[in-house]
Amino acid sequence: MLSPKEIKRLDQEIALVPTRKSACIEALKIIQQHRGWVSDESLRDIAEYMEMSVEELDSVATFYNLIFRKPVGRNIILLCDSISCYVMGYKKIYQHLQDHLHIKFGETTADARFTLLPNACLGCCDHAPTLMINNDLYKDLTNDNLDEILKEYR
Amino acid sequence: MAVIYIDHRAYEVKAGKNLLETCLTLGFNLPYFCWHPAMGSVGACRQCAIKLFKDKDDTQGRLMMSCMESVKDNMYLSINDPVAKSFRSQVIEWLMTNHPHDCAVCDEGGSCHLQDMTVMTGHTYRRFQYPKRTYKNQYLGPFINHEMNRCIQCYRCVRFYKDYAGGTDLDAFAAHDHIYFGRAADGVLENEFSGNLAEVCPTGVFTDKSLKEHYTRKWDMTMAPSICQHCSLGCNIIAGERYGELRQITNRFNGEVNGYFICDKGRFGYEFVNSINRIQQPIIRTKIPEAVDKNSLYDYLKTVLSNRTVIGIGSPRASLESNFALMQLVGKGNFYQGVSETDAQLMRTILHTLNAGHVHIPSLKETEIADAILVLGEDLTNAAPLLALTVRQAVHRKPLENAQQISVPPWHDTARREFAQEEKGPLFIAYPTKTKLEALAANCQYLSPDEIARLGFAIANRLDNTAPAPQGVDEDTLQIAQHIANTLKQAERPLIICGTSLRNEAILKAAANIACALGTEDKKASLFYVMEECNSMGLAMMEVPSLKQATEALKKKEANTVIILENDLYRRDAKSAIDDFLEQCEELIVLDHLHHETSNRATVLIPVGTFAEAEGTLVNNEGRAQCFFQVFAPKNENFRESWRWLDEFRQFKQGISPEDLQAPGDLMMEMAASMPQFKGAEEVAPSADFRISGQKIPREPHRYSGRTAMLANIQVSEPKPPEDHDSALSYTMEGYRGIPPAPLIPFFWAPGWNSAQSVNKYQEEVGGPIRGGDTGKRLFPETPAIENAFLNTIPPAYKASPGEWLVVPLQHIFGSEELSIYTHGVAERAPHPYIAISQQDANDLNTREYQLMQVTIGTLNYELPVMIKKELPHGVVGIPYHVSGLIGIAWPAKGILKPVMT
Amino acid sequence: MEKPLTQHISSNHPWLNLKDYTNVGGYQAVHRALKSMTPEEVTKIVQDSELKGRGGAGFNTGMKWSFVPMDDVRQTKYLITNADEMEPGTFKDRLLLEGNPHQLIEGMIVSAYAIQANISYIFLRWAYKKAARIIEEAIAEAYAAGYLGKDILGSGFNLEMHLHTGVGRYICGEETALLNALEGKRAIPRSKPPFPQVSGLFGKPTIVNNVETLCNIPHIVNNGADWFKALSMGSDAGTKLYGISGQVNKPGLWELPMGTTVRELIEEHAGGMKPGFKFRGALPGGASTDFLVTEHLDVKMDYQSVAAAGSRLGTGTMVILDDHTCPVGFVHNLEHFFAQESCGWCTPCREGLPWTEKILLSIENGEGRLEDLELLEMHTKYLGPGNTFCALAPGAMEPLQSGLKYFRADFEKHIHEKKCPWDEQRNGSHLY
Ligand SMILES: Cc1cc2nc3c(=O)[nH]c(=O)nc-3n(C[C@H](O)[C@H](O)[C@H](O)COP(=O)(O)O)c2cc1C
Ligand code: SF4
Ligand code: FES
């Protein structure tokens, strides 16, 4: 069931586009914002509201890598694995994250605190290596400042 | 016209046409995947690459995708260019990197477009050294099997299912090399055209599940050209047999009728042929034992037929030949249509309009180009499925064509869709409930049958004020009528669709009036009739009385013996009326292939061949006569064509004894000679003595295997193959290997093209008619209008009558038809009996969804669960037409409803 | 040296809000264009300025606009800013978006006026959260000040502006895939023709321009075409945002005259290679450009000169390959990216890129064979422009083909020694 708050947000987006369907990516984003990820059930509800079939919506949802169709942790770590960060040693950061959180790319910690995902270039290559946690960008990473950063997220 | 040069040779071709199509039309073996003749180009697979040179002197050239180019004058091209060739084989190598190479266990093997293209490009050696990607398969319902690992991501499945057929439950998921085609979760594919996936998919991802149950490779099948038996449209099919079992139906291209596609009822509804419910042996119920051999039957009938007055009851699902043979046996005056008086009258009305000639009856293909459509009282998806598919194309066509304004060529599928977006051409539907085409329609009116007719009359009157106008129509309806009239008037090719489903003659008349009112000298409106069965039209054209008169004849003791041809009368009229009729018969002789309520009452029961074991001619809704041919000579010698039995009985009647029986003459010739309305039907297919280079056309492909071993468990020496004296087709693999005339094409197959795509080679130009012309002969030549005679029997305004409900029959593609239901997948998809009631009426009756309702129709009583269909007009309820347990109702019906107390 | 785009952006100051922006002369171009110029005049001046699209392909911007049909005034038209910036190694648009959003908005208003578009979108990549906040605010300010909305400055011209943030996928930056993404569909590229200028968003005439491209527009309108051309030191007009990342002393981003040399960028602006690191090569304009190597250090960074050196200016943001980094691993990282980001529509890209990725990994892991180099070369040949549906795969082949050319010895060494020569230096495991 979509909440009244969600529906209100959906309606705002629908009002901006020529056909209802064309707001479907916005709809997925809104639900993900509220619920962390898009479950099969959420997907069904959105599809119904957007007057689309589940298939049609899931076809869109599964195309985009930042729509999460599996449960994720409370905090999402997006580690840049693109070329500048590669040159500047993102693999060491990745190793460090693995050692400390005991998760690999695509995995979530047992306490659901973190989900770790690789991400394409975050657009601050002059401060590589970089990562994002939720909405926060971290640059010039070293193993030392990484520990400090992770502490911020419960 | 344009001149293009391919590998230094000049060709004169049509300018503006798609280049890939042009190359294929010229006979080049140019591989492709994502392109499809009915769906155009998208340029995804990159398989059709050829070289384009700037001019004659350019030796470099550049690769380009032939499917994404239009033919222009003076193009210098190369298909054989080494780079182009090597690129094409590279594309295959890419596609094969993840393909499982499981041809040996794959249902597609031997008729696989991917196999063909792989061989065609010469890719043989695998250089990809890494593990293959694998997928999970899905359960997709009873018709289609899913094997995703074989996918080559050509996108044809979604493009057909979603874009072309309007399905919503199949799509492409994920991205990069994880693309997946399927449903969101396991479940039945709901679109009525899902079976085409098996032909559209170039490999073994989507395959025919019914074939899987008795699998046979294409090359091992005995095949014949045939006509679908399950509705009035007459789609052309290929039927294949092995070991005496019918195993597969595939599409047989007919440019005027079904084109590239058939519906799931047509594709999967064939299992009745293999049913254990088949009548196996002649039965004489007065004898012990009942089952008799042919000679005893002959002896018995010889006496019966020469001593009694016999009437014959024809059938709208039997061939012209069989109906005619019965008529000849009993005499024209004693031959009756095996349908109710209501149904006969509906067909008379249709014939009247057709014979008057002032409207144009379009072929199925023509409906695809209509630019404004009005549907009066039909649920196309369920009553005439392929028409729903063509109407869908028509609705999208104009907006797509608008893309030509920005020079997007007609074959450019994605660009046209991107330009057209959600725009649609006008479609209006008037029907008591929602139909599946609703999503496409500009306006839907939910009306009782009489109100549908009145709306129709109002539209006709708005178009031409000399047409009769209904009285007492409300302002809203008038406005809608005006709007529809305006839209139809503005259209260049308006199309009116109506039919017999609702059993309302006024609708047919209203539709005819609209078509007349629209017709002018230069522009004729098209009027499309939906009927019930594969030979409804043919039977009606015989112009004989209905069951009602047959009953009267029996009652008047004009006869006491009845021969019923391939007909379960309980599906024709009220149970009481049929009981009444059957009680009058002293001797009841029934010829049919399946046991049913009527055959159970027979005193003499004679097994006959189904369409797969018989040859015959049918007339479809459009008045097109088409032939189907025997697919195989059945092991059971009793499975003989009805007309063969009946012609023998005629000979008995004439005093010929069984030993002296003659093979029947050409019944169609005889029929056309005695009934001029059938003139032309005898020429539909080349006659039995037709030969090409002295050879017959083989039903078996040249790779047919096991011929010498098939029966080795019974008899080591190979039996002589059966001979076919009735047609130019042979039962062997020997014979003419080229392209036969369209009516005799038993399968599509060309060197290097083993899959369904080989049809390209049979067409005059790709997508165009079969070489030498498509199959079928229209029996209603268009005559100039005699006069603009409007029909006038406008029903009074519909008023719900308290305590009594108008019960309308709701058609179901799966379930309403008699024969297809024997396929368990079709049965699985059929609805359980229900009664559809509007929300308001449900409230009035104090009932809810799923609650049981006692429904009394005449002498019949049913307890049916309630299904709410909000939109139904007040006082109108619907029950699923002819689903199991709900036959024996006389339509149109009135009913009394009482909620069952629990 | 003039730096029109970045003169008011400073890392020490927050973004320029409407007041700041107007204080430094902002929105004058809107006044000028809407009040005293016809749409055709705006297009003409842009065309005359020889501004080339900064999104990578370098097509003349004014020319692109001139393909928009201007006769049917009732038709909806769209202007879209491509702020998807996802090309690895690229970080230039971020600065403009976060530093001076009104400059972009002003550029969009003037550009929309030129093509008479009444609806505009900024298609922003998901990761640019800060930019999203700032742009939202700036758009609201612009509406409040009457620069957006109905009858802008009494000119009768209307313009709506919306921010759309993506949900990932590099291909969304491809302008036609971007249109599909905006329509709420899978971001599969569209075939061209028809070009977006005639059939774009929702089938209507549409212009898609890069952030940097559009930010130049107000300055061109204010100062004229000749001024713009004079900014350059090379064969293309204007300034360019150049960036450098990798093992240099001062990685960063600078607005410099078009045509600044590679050497100047590395040595002067980026402060040279870090101690102990040697320059081996560079991708001049993001991940999908061919390597330049030592012999190219004096190449001018403009479209023509870089092309003459066998590469592309691309986005003008350079990634440096140093001698501590394995070139095979470097290229493998790139091909991994491209394989992941293939939309999956056309065969060569969908199946070919993962293949090259797998080969590169096996070479990197010491499991490569000499035949593998032929296979890689085959891919560079057959995934070229025109053979695939869009430019993603051809772009992906650029670093591979030039990598094979300039670093072939390194590839062969991997194969002969059955290991990566850089292995010892590297700690941390191989990932893919
Ligand atoms: C795979 C791919 C990704 C692209 N990504 C971007 C991008 O992130 N930003 C951008 O401005 N242009 C990108 N482009 C270029 C755009 O397609 C388009 O050419 C550009 O936005 C036009 O703007 P311009 O004329 O101002 O350069 C990309 C192209 C391709 C083929
Ligand atoms: S090259 Fe082909 S598969 Fe790759 S991103 Fe472009 S269209 Fe998609
Ligand atoms: S058939 Fe031409 S690209 Fe697929």
Image (cartoon, rainbow, N blue to C red):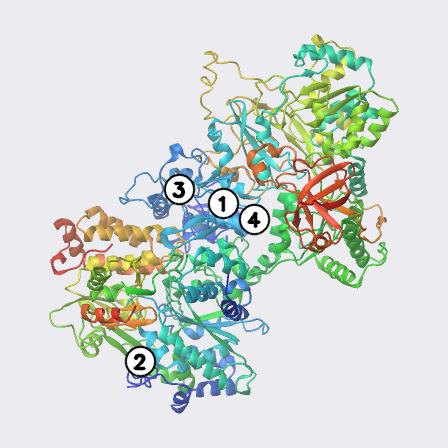
Which callout, 3 or 1, points to the residue nearer the camera? 1
Q: Residues within 10 Å of mark 4 (few under 14, many from 20)?
A: many
Return the x and y of residue B798 as percentages of the image width and height. Answer: 81, 52
Whole-angstrom CA distance, mark 4 to mark 3, is: 23 Å
Of pointers 3 and 1, the one earlier in the residue sequence = 3
Tell me the kind of residue under disc 3. Answer: Arg
On residue B165, the disc is 4
- Which-is-in-front pick, marks 2 and 4? 4
Marks 2 and 1 close (CB-CB < 8 Å): no
What separation in Å lies between label 2 and label 3 (alpha carbons)? 55 Å
Quadrant (top left, top right, bottom left, bottom right) of the C terminus of chain C: bottom left
Mark 3 surroundings within 10 Å by alpha-carbon count, few (fewer than 14), some (14 through 19), many (20 or more): many
Q: Nearer the viewer, mark 2 or mark 1?
A: 1
Any part of residue B298 in sight: yes
**Relative to B718, is B301 on the left or the right?**
right
Q: Residue at x 44, y 86 (%)?
A: C27
Q: Pinpoint residue A62: horizontal percent, then vertical percent.
A: 41, 56
Query: What residue would you read off at disc 3?
Result: B150
Q: Amino acid at mark 2?
A: Ser
Which residue is labeled 1 in the image?
A: B187
